[in-house]
Image (cartoon, rainbow, N blue to C red):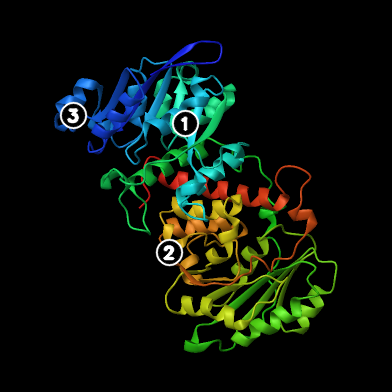
Amino acid sequence: MRTTAQGGTAHSVSVIISAMYTTHHLQKMVAVSQQLGSEDIVVAAASHLIPEIPTPVRAKTRMVPVEPEQQINPFSGRALAASHARGAVLLFLGEDRFYSAMELRRFLFPIVHGRVQVLLSCEGRRHHRSRMTMPLDSLILFFHELLGRTDLGTASLFGTPHAITQIALRRISSELLQHPAHALYQWMKTGARIGVQQVEPMRDTLPYNPQLYGATQGECSFFEKAVIREQMDFAASRPHRNGLTDGGRRREELFQEPIPERVQPRQTVEKGSRLSVIIPARNEARTIEAVIREVKLLNPLEVIVVVNGSQDSTTAKARACGAVIVEFAHPLGVDSGRAVGASLAAGEILLFVDADFVLPAQDLYPFVLGCQQGIDLALNDQSAFFESHSGNVVVAARQALNLVADRKDLGTGSMLAVPFALRKEAFASLDWSLLACPPLAQMAALTAGLRVELVHAVDSFSLNRFRPEKHLAKRGHSPAVAQMLGDHMEAFHYWSKQYRGGNPK
């Protein structure tokens, strides 16, 4: 394919087709590549698959063998083939979709006409898979947000088709293409022009590739695990919280205060499991009494209210309700009261609620019940409440965390959201201070093999009190969003330390 660009320069296009795990797609893709007019079709094929490729296909292409030790990385073939490509523009096709020649010509337009140097793809809105962001897309969306490239959306070098110019390739070397997240970041750093173009796949047939993409709904495919490894390797190269705020947490001071005097234990909910309810509070005099009254319907052993930095009557009202008071004169920072309360709790089951809104006991009991039935960490299923928030980076981060931990079934379930409950015995092997950073605590629980389940759906998302100082920003992220994104980066760093050089589960 030779297309005249602006200024009259002709651009030849090399088509690079991956065949790392199957060859069933090659004949059709090679035919489409010929329809494009490409005179350089390069196939990156697993060495053991090359003999089964039909002779006519081999005659029309150049084969680049990918040896067995390289096949663990599904992106390694692209790097090898790119080093052999002759065209001024390299078009990469994968093993998961077919595209018509007309659609690929339209896709290539911005790059062959010199408008961009790196061209990524996204599916057109007509065939968008669902209103919710897909699990793998959520991970990509999260990192693009951190890198300040929200314009890229969920488009990435992991997916195909994508195209690059030889000029752009020389900036980073073809070898880096086997690490797509690092390659894209290097292009960002060098100022390469990166764009996104919609492209519509053919819907009548799909390549059959169970080895690469086959998985049940709740598990990760080989391809997804490969993307996770690459993204987490990139995360490990970034600063601990990517320079984002820690929400004013005073982690080093959490356990320096004396343990308060306790109320006498008494019997709790059915089956004899003793329950501690933990409520962090700061200036919540308006709601704290109603919150305590409702949780007391569960007949808990104790209600621990961790008052920090309050300047109103929160402490007096909570004490009058019979709560155990743990009071700090200064604010501990976001969620830190959870860690303090958990470390002091005497119950076998710990239930966490917030002080700024009231949830009925009927919606709290399922979390306690779940722990009584053997669940170590019982989470709130908020997925139904997030359907209108597709593309929200915090929602994406929550989904991405569970994907990385190989728990796609948890969806957007997160310890960021109350109510949730945990079994003290199960969580005791972890550091209570982790609870100050909910995504980090959740990742630690998942990687430790704790039984984590969604048990009930409560719309606490819409009940959170709006606080302008936390939820608004003149530009960039609000303090609340920045803190939650930083929390997830901490969780990803934790995962990387646990699994560096290996695979999750």
Question: With respect to residue 486, does 450 lie above or below?
Answer: below
- Residue 142 percent across, percent down from the top left: 56, 45
Residue sitting at x 41%, y 41%: 227
- Residue 158 percent across, percent down from the top left: 43, 37
Task: Decide which of tag 2 and tag 1 comes sooner along the chain.
Answer: 1
Q: CA distance from mark 1 to mark 3?
A: 29 Å
Label 1 element class:
helix
**Residue type marked 3:** Ile
Residue sitting at x 42%, y 61%: 409
Q: Quadrant of residue 466?
A: bottom right
What label does residue 450 carry, if any?
Answer: 2
Mark 1 — residue?
107
Residue sitting at x 60%, y 52%: 392
Mark 3 — residue?
50
Q: Nearer the viewer, residue 234 or 278?
A: 234
Foreground mark, 2 or 3, reads 3
- Residue 42 percent across, percent down from the top left: 30, 23
Q: Quadrant of residue 69?
A: top left
Question: With respect to residue 182, does 221 lie above or below?
Answer: below
Q: Nearer the viewer, residue 27 or 172?
A: 27
- Residue 220 percent across, percent down from the top left: 37, 52
Rate crowding at label 3 as few (under 14), some (14 to 19) or many (20 or more) other CA atoms within 10 Å. many
